[in-house]
Image (spheres, rainbow, N blue to C red):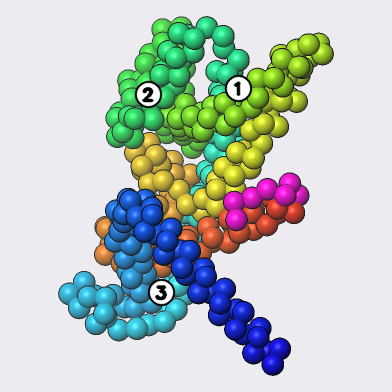
Amino acid sequence: MKLFIKEFSLERRKVDRLKRFNVYLIRYWQLYAMLLLPVAFFVIFKYGPMYGVLIAFKDFNLFQGISKSPWIGLDTFRAVFKMQDFYTALKNTFMLNFLDLIVSFPAPILLAIMLNELRIAWFKKISQTVLYLPHFISWIIIGGIVYQVFSTNTGIINHMLAGLGIDPIPFLSNKYYWLLTYLGTGVWQSAGWGTIIYLAALTGISKELYEAAEVDGAGRLKRIWHITIPGIKPTIIVLLILKLGEMVQIGFDRPFVIGNVQVREFSEVLSTFVYKMGMQSGEYSVATAVGFFQAVVGLVFILTSNYISKKTTDQGII
């Protein structure tokens, strides 16, 4: 009898929830209608292409298509893990992303704090605009600018150094100088845009906290350290977790445009490796297998970093 009452109660709750949902759906149907377009976008352009992952497990033939190509199981992955070029690209991907994390991740935080401390409104707006602009420039154009500025023979900087009697610096032909150029260009292109998120987070900090700290005699640096940084700490943690999840992912544009044969030891990354295997060599199964590998490792990184963050700071994205 008790079991029957319990089951009846559960069924009644389900019916009540369904009724409440129907009422809510009828009342706010416009909101659900607005969701149709973004949901359709994700289904068509995000989830639909996942069918192509099957290429990694098949001996893909362009003329037979995905469905008719023969299954080969994990043979493609075994072949990929035997390639020396794959490990070189993987090592460079981790290296460049790790250095980007050290150099590029703190840059928008520092910029946002400095912009937040500006008191002249017109100068603050001009500074924000100047800092945001590089984000809207194509990497092809940025690559042209980099070569005009840093080229060994024709670059502006080396022309100035030659005028001072100093030997030219091989910014783009020496792998270590190229690495500095790569990191610096990345900071210049992305830091300003990244400040938008932190500036938005800074607006949520109560002004009364700053006023109270100022009354207590706290200087500007102390106010930044004890109020500003703790106020944007949740945002920093979330973005850091997402950044760690991209450690094995790397954009194609920057290393491909700025890189060259002379610095291939550093510039060959997984994205350029996939491009060469897929588009140039026609090894679509290999390219797909590497892409699938990146996705799985990226997911593991996100879940691991989120777990650690939850345990240490009680904050995360999941």
Image quadrant in which you'd find residue 202: top right
Q: Amino acid at mark 2?
A: Leu
- Is 295 situated above or below 94? below
Residue drawn at the location 55% of the way across and 46% of the way down? 243
Please, what secondary structure does the residue beneath circle 2 have? Answer: helix
* Residue 215: numbered disc: none
Identify the image quadrant of residue 198: top right
Q: Amino acid at mark 1?
A: Ile
Question: Residue 255, relative to residue 111: is it above or below?
Answer: below
> Where in the figure is residue 281, as x and y percent of width and height?
28, 62
Residue 133 - label: 2
Identify the residue shown where x is 45% and y is 48%. 250
Q: Which residues are magenta?
A: 312-318
Image mark for residue 76: 3
Could you tell me the amino acid type at mark 3? Answer: Thr
For image coordinates 54% across by 27% down, the residue present is: 199
Residue 38 appears in the picture as rendered: no
